[in-house]
Image (cartoon, rainbow, N blue to C red):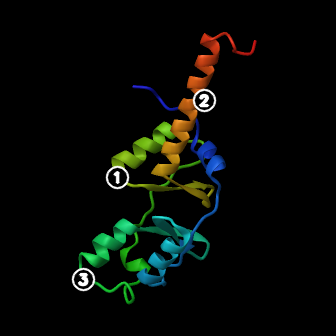
Amino acid sequence: MIKITGTVGSVLKRKGSEVWFVTPDKTVYEAIERMADKAVGALLVISDGKLVGIISERDYARKVILKGRSSRTTLVKEIMTSPVIFVTPGQTVDQCMDIMTRNRIRHLPIIESEKVLGVISIGDVVKWVVSEQEETIEHLQNYISSNYPT
């Protein structure tokens, strides 16, 4: 199996570090509305500057819809996932993919010294891996055809 090199920090640098979040006292409806507005599948839950949870479309489907609850009266803190699984910028993309796969999650906050630097999704990771592989293929093709810079 091919090991994917590169760090989570390099994925974040390419993707950008904008962080979308809600506070725990918001309603699930407000959180879903924000997800739709920002075209994301999850939001961090931040209270007093600290990461306290994460809420995803999956949380909404499983903990509100399937349980017959109301998104307008259920609070984010009632259904958020906590504690949050996260990675640091120095961890490898390979480690990140392993964490996402083992925990069946699609979004990972990147944290350093208790500060949220950004969030990456499985889609961001896949884009990064494909881009890296395309670059490797291009280098190999140039090498084979003797166009490789010396």
Q: Earlier in the sequence, mark 1 or mark 3?
A: 3
Amino acid at the residue labelled 3: Gly
Vertical order, 119 against 131 (above or below): below
* Residue 137, percent from left and from top: 56, 24
* Residue 67, percent from left and from top: 24, 78
Residue at x 52%, y 44% (from the top left corner) = 127
User: Residue beneath label 3, please?
Assistant: 68
Query: Mark 1 packing: few (<14 Cα in 10 Å), some, or many (20+)?
Result: few
User: Residue beneath label 2, please?
Assistant: 135
Q: For the residues marked 2 and 1, what is the alpha-carbon distance in whole angstroms?
A: 29 Å
Between residue 6 and residue 78, name the one nearer to us. 6
Is 91 on the left-hand or right-hand side of 32?
Answer: right
Residue at the extreme right of the image, as rendered? 150
Residue 45, numbered circle? none
Amino acid at the residue labelled 2: Glu
Query: Mark 2 packing: few (<14 Cα in 10 Å), some, or many (20+)?
Result: few
Badge 3 element:
loop
Q: Earlier in the sequence, mark 2 or mark 1?
A: 1
Q: For the residues marked 1 and 3, what is the alpha-carbon distance in whole angstroms?
A: 24 Å
Between residue 49 and residue 76, name the one nearer to us. 76
- Frontmost of labels 2 and 1 is 2
Q: Earlier in the sequence, mark 2 or mark 3?
A: 3
User: Residue beneath label 1, please?
Assistant: 104
Residue 92 visible in this rendered orientation of the protein = no
Badge 2 element:
helix
